[in-house]
Amino acid sequence: MSRSSAVVDRSAREAGTLLPGLPGWTGRSDVERVELYTRGSLYVVAWFLLAMAALSSAALLRTTSGVVGVLAAVLLCGVLVTVVVRAATRGPEPPGTGRLPWSLLGSLVAVHLGLVAWATSLGAQAATTLVMIGAGSLGWAAGAVDDRRLRWAAVVLGVAGAYVATGSVFLTAYVGGVVLFFAFTVMSSLWLLRVIIELDRARGSQAALAVAEERLRFSRDVHDVLGRQLSVIAVQSELAATLSRRGDPRTAEKILEVRATAHEALREARELARGYRPLDLEQELEGAVSLLRSAGIDADADLSGLPDAWHEPAARVVREAVTNVLRHSDARRVRIRYAERSVVVVDDGSAGSVAAGDGSGLATLRDDLAPLGARLHSGPRADGGFEVRLALAGTGPGEGDR
């Protein structure tokens, strides 16, 4: 289990402990709980405000028919608002960005206009309360839909209805402000929910990217380790076969060298699998020189003066360059030097033999070392041979590509 998954599971267990046995809560992820809480809050607050408006209207009307009419209007508005908010927060689209429920919104507009018509026969205070039921419901529902024009249309309808019913500029402004506040409240709640969902998706993508990067790093290390060692085994085996055909007594010695190289490759592969394989520059240089010489190539290396911070990148470059020499070059001499802020691996192989290499290892190294302020260049030299140059920050570029 990854670290991010463990954190999520721990948070889920803690939340389940705080609210034990709550239906629909235990077993959900943090984001699912936030989504459930947001939707539930929108439902509860909408019904609470409608209930307060119903009580105020009933107290002002004081007639049985009036109270029944208000309760019917509140129930109808509550159901329509709940269905609109549910439709806007459920489904494959992000909350508040789904398809417009025109039929439901049209029903709310019809209820609002009916309440405005009723309110025109009442006093200013009772009329304001009735208009607030329809206009507030319309604003609450419009806030759940990602359409700025619809939200402003709800405000305009609320303001117009309040002015028609009361004729008071103050009450009209009051209703308009409340409708605008309702729309903003729902809109901002759903916006915050969308941000949380996007952050959770980004966290999941980041975890997947980290896994992919780790797999890529491991594959590169496998290429570095096994590619070089298998190249050496191939060269040593060929040499042993040649000696065997000649009846040379050194054949057994060369075969033992092949076995030793295979054991070394196995050891490095095991260390790589365990995740603690070190990369030491001195050991890498000694191994490179030894491998080249065992293949009949004159080699020497001197990287004295190289800053410690660049030891590991230089070791990777030396390993890849030596592997390319063993696999693709007909070189007879290799020099590894550090001068003028550059690590240079030079061989005297011909350009034709060099072209056989695909250069994928060097291309990968070039991409890996670029963020460190280093540039890796490779190509034929003007005086013959081939050069791989790791130019540290502040040095000039080389030419070509291997």
Image (cartoon, rainbow, N blue to C red):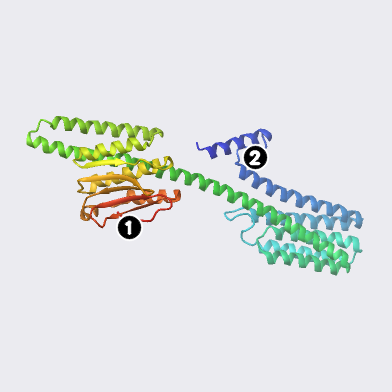
Q: Quadrant of residue 61?
A: bottom right
Instruction: Please state the horizontal and vertical placement of residue 211, each as a whole percent of the image.
Output: 46, 43
Percent x, y for residue 399?
32, 57
Between the residue at mark 1 and the residue at mark 2, the CA separation in whole angstroms equals 63 Å
In this picture, residue 142 sits left or right of residue 72: left
Circle on res. 334: none
In-image side of 295 versus 117 (left or right): left
Label 2 belongs to which residue?
25
- 395 vs 130, nearest the viewer: 395
Which residue is under mark 1?
399
Of residues 273 and 132, the one drawn nearer to the viewer in this rendering = 273
Instruction: Give, as a three-letter code, the residue at label 1.
Output: Glu
Name the residue: 84% across, 58% down.
Answer: 69
Q: Residues within 10 Å of mark 2 (few under 14, many from 20)?
A: some
- Judged from the image, the secondary structure of the residue bearing numbered disc 1 is loop
Local packing at callout 1 (Cα closer than 10 Å; few below 14, some 14-19, many 20+) is some
- Image position of 137 with respect to 27: above or below: below
Q: Earlier in the sequence, mark 1 or mark 2?
A: 2
* x and y, in percent, of residue 76 in the image: 76, 57
Q: Quadrant of residue 124?
A: bottom right
